[in-house]
Amino acid sequence: MGVKISATPKEGRYLTFMYRQQIEEGRRVTTTILAKSFKVNPATVTEILQKLAEKKLVEYTRYYGAGLTERGVVKAQKLLRKHRILEVLFVKFLRYDAEKACEEASKIDYYCSEDLINAICRTYEHPNRCPCNKIIFSDPKCRGQQ
Amino acid sequence: MGVKISATPKEGRYLTFMYRQQIEEGRRVTTTILAKSFKVNPATVTEILQKLAEKKLVEYTRYYGAGLTERGVVKAQKLLRKHRILEVLFVKFLRYDAEKACEEASKIDYYCSEDLINAICRTYEHPNRCPCNKIIFSDPKCRGQQ
DNA sequence: GCAAAATTTAGGATTAACCAAACATTTTTA
DNA sequence: TAAAAATGTTTGGTTAATCCTAAATTTTGC
């Protein structure tokens, strides 16, 4: 196995945002879009994109924008899996609506272990869609479907 | 209401540790004990205790040790409530053993909203003991028992 | 009362997130 | 197509959280 690639919490948010934009919605990811979404100065975005590029999680082209690398995609999917499994839990177990489930999941997804997520996943028999119908990526360690 | 007293994640750990030591086990809390428990240099402990003292969460006596203030106790109880409610969830819902439940709870307790914790609490009908039989403090906003 | 143990102080280091202002590049448009 | 507008980057900061070592101080145990 390679060296463990770690993203900070904020970097994680950038990765999942980029995944949704780029992969799920086929849109280009620009500095401005990120800056607006995260309500930060564009300079901050540039800095974080450069860090993510160093970590080989995104491919970054100055003045153009950034795209996830293969490793970035994997990382984003892992985070989105956590997020979406938590959403399932909150909706099914606590009867939260989808929006609130998303909010609460965002607060803790990054910090949840894969183990915990897999335990929840098993309990709900490996759901493959989150409450807003987005796909839940499977984890081989979870013995889920396909 | 007063100004919101915020503790950082690490400070939160110190508060709950101190609660367990001081209140639940009647032991004095010294710099050395904290340094050993958190595996850090004693100088680091001193620094954090001073910060907590500034925030009026602990009363700190140089060369002697520290004790939680009333505000510190309240804060610690809030954190312990989160921790223990999560433990209940993990044991009952995921069939984790008490130790693993504690471990996983520690990773996320700080980041969980009171709202989320209360929703879990309600679902389990306001448990007042965690899996290792420690008390779960009630939250008026949760409409629990005493 | 003195040496050993415990603790604090002083002075740093690192990392994550931010920002403003100046500068560079790209895009738009007249 | 050239300037203006929009966008993006660089430079040079800031703050906060955690952590450290070494020297100095205080307490404690014998």
Image (cartoon, coloured by chain):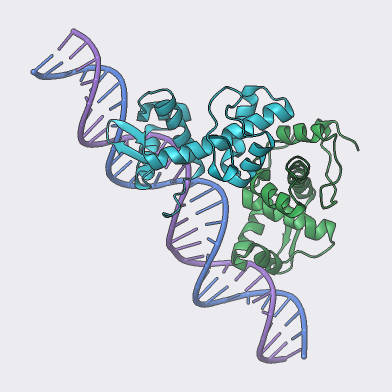
Chain colours: A cyan, B green, C purple, D blue
Residue B25: x %, y % from top left: 84, 61
Left or right of residue B72: residue C27: left
Is residue A86 placed above or below B6 in the rendered structure? above
Which of the 4 image quadrants contains residue A144? top right
Q: Nearer the viewer, residue D13 or A91?
A: A91
Residue A2 visible in the shown view: yes
Q: Residue furthest front?
A: A146
User: Which residue is found at the position 68% from the left and 26% from the top?
Assistant: A91
Which of the 4 image quadrants contains residue A25? top left
Residue B54 visible in the shown view: no
Residue B140: x %, y % from top left: 83, 33
Is residue A101 placed above or below B15 in the rendered structure? above
Name the quadrant of the N terminus of chain A.
bottom left
User: Which residue is found at the position 63% from the left and 48% from the top?
Assistant: B9
User: Which residue is found at the position 44% from the left and 49% from the top?
Assistant: A5
Q: Residue furthest right?
A: B146
Which of the 4 image quadrants contains residue A41? top left
Residue A142: x %, y % from top left: 59, 42
Left or right of residue B72: residue A141: left
Residue C28: x %, y % from top left: 24, 14
Q: Nearer the viewer, residue A95 or B146?
A: A95
